[in-house]
Image (cartoon, rainbow, N blue to C red):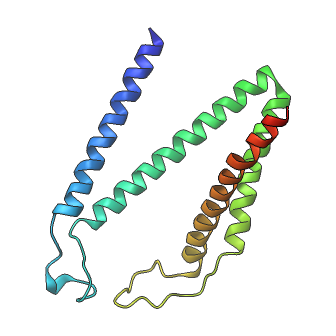
Amino acid sequence: MAVTKIHRTSRTVLLIGIVISLVVLGLFYLGGQVPAHQKIAADMSQPKFTDIVLYWAYVLLAVTLIVLLLFAIVAFFKQMKESPKKAMGGLLILVGLAALLIVTYVIGDGTLLNIPGYDGNDNRPPTLKMTDMWLYSAYFMFTMTILAMVILPLFKKRK
């Protein structure tokens, strides 16, 4: 009974997320352009509903991070009761992820960008370093995923 309720709830949440995403993307692609007198750069395309797409992406990212952290915390404490050694292994993975984020933030470039027509406050060294942090971390994790897909089957064949 509980499993069907979980499936029903997760399916409903997924469908709601897909519908909202389709509406937002429809507004972005079919909503037209900003009037010429309001454009930031006159010679560039600027859809009307760019802000809505960005805010929806922020909402999806925030919900994903919150759910991920909640599940990680609950799983850690559950595992701590059953097998403390395995729980420490999971904690080491989170510490490794934190170390990756710190290292990639430190190596990020904070040089101000020359962006024509942009007067906002996001062109600052901390914001630029954080952007580099996310990009470098994604590159690293993507590389590790590809390497794992190539190398791990080789070890499996040996056994």
Q: For the image shown, how many numbered marks are present on the structure?
A: 0
Left/right of residue 79 with respect to residue 128 in the rendered view: right
Q: Is residue 15 above or below residue 78?
A: below
**Residue 60 location in percent, x, y?**
42, 49
Q: Is residue 18 above or below residue 117?
A: above
Q: Residue furthest front?
A: 157
Nearer to me, 23 or 51 = 23
Quadrant for the C terminus, please.
Answer: top right
Residue at image position (13%, 79%) is: 35
Residue at image position (67%, 30%) is: 75
**Residue 141 location in percent, x, y?**
65, 56
Query: Residue 16 occupies which quadrant of the picture?
Result: top left
Left/right of residue 129 with respect to residue 103 in the rendered view: left
**Residue 103 location in percent, x, y?**
74, 67
Nearer to me, 106 or 15 = 15
Query: Residue 91 occupies which quadrant of the picture?
Result: top right
Q: Is residue 2 above or below residue 40?
A: above
Residue at image position (79%, 35%) is: 157
Query: Residue 106 occupies which quadrant of the picture?
Result: bottom right
Quadrant for the N terminus, please.
Answer: top left
Residue at image position (38%, 25%) is: 9
